[in-house]
Image (spheres, rainbow, N blue to C red):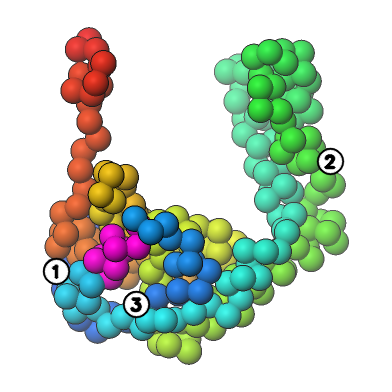
Amino acid sequence: RASRRHARRDDAEFLSSETLDNVRLGVPRTVFYERLAAPEAPVIDAALRALGTLGASLVDPADIDTARAVSDVRSDVMLYEFKRDLSRYLRDLGDASPIRSIRELIRFNEARPQEMLRYGQVLLLAAQATNGLQTETYRRSRAEDLRLSRTDGIDRVMARERLDALVFPGWSGAAIGAKAGYPSVIVPAGYTAEGAPIGLTFLGRAWSEPTLLRVAHAFERATLLRRPPPSVASSPGGSSL
């Protein structure tokens, strides 16, 4: 939960910086950059150069020691928390829905296989089979997630390299950031020769939103890479309605 010490009414004050002097950004090459497709790599390289032009100091590489373990380990945390959170959501729907639990949702889907089970419901069934957040299985999985993603992962590399944030291509840093419970922001990094959009993610430790917003805003203002999506009317075969 956010403490009053970190509460803010408006983050706009962090969007005024046009340079990134004195900002240290880490580039975790191992695992995260290895997954880049050939057409994507030059786009990300150009984005990193743009950050350097803005004055940021790039620590490249700034590898996360646990990167492979975070990717490989099978965690049960999502199933346990998915059951808790979806159950709360369903209970709070009120008159908007007759379904009040995951069990009822599963039965609803089973009664309508043609419409509702085209892709199955493996996740729902696995979540329903869990036994609550007080079980040893959940607590052990959660502790391991935090160790790999936070204590021995993000925290360690950021302390070692004195970093303000980490820079990931696309959404490749989503899992490690989510497991750590840390904030991130993604902005457009550019487009491949075929026109496919690619993002750039800035991730930091707890309560680092001001720094992340400053970096993301400065990058966006300097590069102006965002393109509005084509409208239906202007797309091939689109309707003018």
In 3D space, how far apart are the residues under numbered discs 1 and 2 (Cα atoms)? 51 Å
* Secondary structure at numbered mark 3: strand
* Image: magenta residue range: 40-48
Residue 235 image offset from top left, x and y in percent: 23, 23
Identity of the residue drawn at 28% across and 44% down: 194
Residue 39's label in the rendered image is none
State the residue in front, 116 or 104: 116
Q: Residues within 10 Å of mark 1 (few under 14, many from 20)?
A: some
Residue 108, quarter of picture:
top right
Q: Residues within 10 Å of mark 2 (few under 14, many from 20)?
A: few
Residue bearing mark 2: 129
Q: Is residue 76 visible?
A: yes
Residue 25's label in the rendered image is 3
Relative to 10, is 154 above or below? below
Residue bearing mark 1: 18
Earlier-in-chain disc, 2 versus 3: 3
Identity of the residue drawn at 14% across and 62% down: 222
Q: Say what amino acid the circle numbered 1 marks.
A: Glu
Is the residue under label 2 in contact with that under label 1 (CB below 8 Å)? no
Relative to 1, is 5 above or below? below
In 3D space, how far apart are the residues under numbered discs 2 and 3 (Cα atoms)? 42 Å
Identity of the residue drawn at 84% across and 41% down: 129
Earlier-in-chain disc, 3 versus 1: 1
* Secondary structure at numbered mark 1: loop
User: Viewer-nearest of labels 2 and 3?
Assistant: 3
Name the outermost residue toward the front. Answer: 38
